[in-house]
């Protein structure tokens, strides 16, 4: 299994140079999972250990993210969890929902292999914004948009809610699961939304609205 994964990632790297380049870093924003895959390989090359071991040592254990893991090729999700389904097209033109709960997340590598919970995501972003993981000047770069009017810094997304409160965090999806997790700078308000999307309509907008509602709701 590990050998197949390494060969697949080498093919991904070889296929990249032949494609049209994205705009330069000062002219536009472009997201690519390949960037995270390469970062994982850089970590492994520079440390001599897997990126998963580094994340476990530097983030998961110090922050006591007890329900967060990088399972590798293991297909089972530990602990209580929702089932996720993906619609697969059929020859008759219809769709069939296929249970993708037990799948091999290592195919995504550093771009999406991690499994976590809403509680752990809140704890992670609180620690990040509190300066527990990075020195202040690096955290400032994470929160500063690299391109004017864009909503992404170096690894963090920025959102201005309808009530005028700016939040920091990120979102992501893998197959049948999607999560949005954002926090105010002072960490007094945090919202994490985890869903199993039905692929009908714009789930991104729905998640963003739910996050905004949680941040802007009157405090009791």
Image: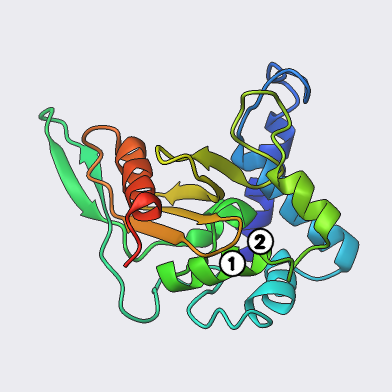
Could you say which is closer to the camera, residue 10 or residue 177? 177
Mark carried by residue 204: none
Mark 2 nearby-residue class (10 Å; few <14, some 14–19, many ≥20): many
Q: Is any atom of residue 97 visible in this view?
A: yes
Q: Residue at x 56, y 63 (%)?
A: 187
Q: Is residue 90 left or right of residue 177?
A: left
> Along the horizontal axis of the image, is 107 left or right of 89?
right
Q: Position of residue 131 (x, y in %)?
A: 74, 66
Q: Residue at x 41, y 59 (%)?
A: 192
- Looking at the picture, tell me which residue is in the foreground, 169 or 136: 136
- Residue 26, image x and y in percent? 78, 22
Q: Quick one: SS at disc 1?
A: helix
The answer, for residue 11, to whether it is visible in the render is no
Q: Residue at x 50, y 45 (%)?
A: 165
Gap in Å between the C-alphas at discs 1 and 2? 5 Å
Quadrant for the C terminus in the image: bottom left
Instruction: State the image coordinates of residue 68 (x, y, percent, origin top left).
Output: 52, 74
Callouts 1 and 2 close, C-beta under 8 Å: yes
Q: Quadrant of residue 185?
A: bottom right
The residue tagged 2 is: 129
**Quarter of the view holding residue 49:** bottom right
Q: Residue at x 27, y 47 (%)?
A: 197
Residue at the spot of label 1: 126
Residue 115: percent from left, percent from top: 48, 67
Pick the residue in front: 142 or 167. 167
Q: Is residue 129 left or right of residue 105?
A: right
């Amino acid at each position: 299994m590990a050998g197949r994964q390494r060969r697949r990632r080498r093919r991904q790297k070889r296929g990249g140079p032949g494609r049209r380049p994205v705009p330069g870093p000062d002219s536009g924003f472009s997201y690519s999972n390949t960037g995270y895959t390469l970062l994982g390989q850089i970590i492994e090359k520079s440390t001599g250990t897997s990126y998963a071991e580094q994340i476990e040592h530097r983030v998961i254990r110090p922050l006591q993210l007890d329900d967060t893991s990088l399972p590798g090729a293991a297909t089972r999700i530990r602990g209580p969890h929702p089932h996720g389904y993906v619609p697969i097209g059929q020859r008759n033109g219809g769709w069939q929902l296929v249970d993708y709960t037990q799948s091999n997340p290592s195919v995504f590598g550093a771009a999406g292999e991690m499994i976590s919970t809403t509680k752990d995501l809140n704890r992670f972003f609180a620690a990040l914004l509190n300066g527990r993981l990075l020195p202040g000047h690096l955290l400032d770069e994470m929160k500063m948009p690299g391109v004017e009017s864009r909503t992404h810094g170096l690894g963090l997304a920025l959102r201005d809610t309808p009530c005028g409160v700016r939040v920091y965090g990120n979102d992501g999806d893998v197959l049948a699961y999607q999560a949005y997790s954002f926090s105010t700078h002072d960490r007094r308000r945090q919202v994490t939304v985890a869903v199993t999307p039905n692929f009908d309509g714009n789930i991104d907008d729905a998640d963003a609205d739910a996050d905004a509602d949680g941040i802007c709701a009157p405090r009791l």
